[in-house]
Amino acid sequence: MNPKRLIKHFPELANLPETEQRALLDKAYKDVFSQENKMKNWRSNLISAALMTSLCFLFVLVLRPALGISSQTSAWVLMLVALPVYFFIQQRRYIQQLRASLKKIQT
């Protein structure tokens, strides 16, 4: 976890000193990735990976032949579109989890 990069995603912490921002983010991180939440996070990651894999198979096995796209072009599309979209969605989920934990900690 890089707190300097994460702080920009939490404007509600902007009025606090940097050390307190880091301490709150560290507490939220420990809360989100605690032993109690390990199976929940694992299951969520497994479901999203399975969903992403099935969408990629759907693209390769159904849409690619239907659209007449070559194998090389479909591979490029998956690498340049699908993989970054998956990473973006995972990052948004991570930030949402931290935000929910921060709200819980601050109240």
Image (cartoon, rainbow, N blue to C red):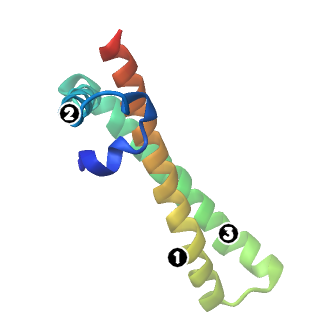
Q: Position of residue 1 (x, y in %)?
A: 23, 47
**Callout 2, which amino acid?**
Asp
Q: Is residue 94 left or right of residue 24?
A: right
Q: Quadrant of residue 68?
A: bottom right
In this rendering, is residue 7 above or below 72?
A: above
Q: Is residue 96 left or right of residue 34?
A: right
Residue type at the position of mark 3: Phe
Q: Position of residue 19 (x, y in %)?
A: 17, 34
Per the image, label 1 sits on a secondary structure element best described as helix
State the separation of the CA atoms marked 1 and 3.
12 Å
| Count of numbered circles in the view | 3
Q: Is residue 80 left or right of residue 43?
A: right
Q: Residues within 10 Å of mark 2 (few under 14, many from 20)?
A: some
Reading the image, the residue beneath label 3 is 59
Residue underneath mark 1: 79
Q: Residue at x 58, y 58 (%)?
A: 54
Q: Earlier in the sequence, mark 1 or mark 2?
A: 2
Q: Does the CB distance between marks 1 and 2 fall below 8 Å?
A: no
Give the residue displayed 30% in from the left and 27% down from the top.
16
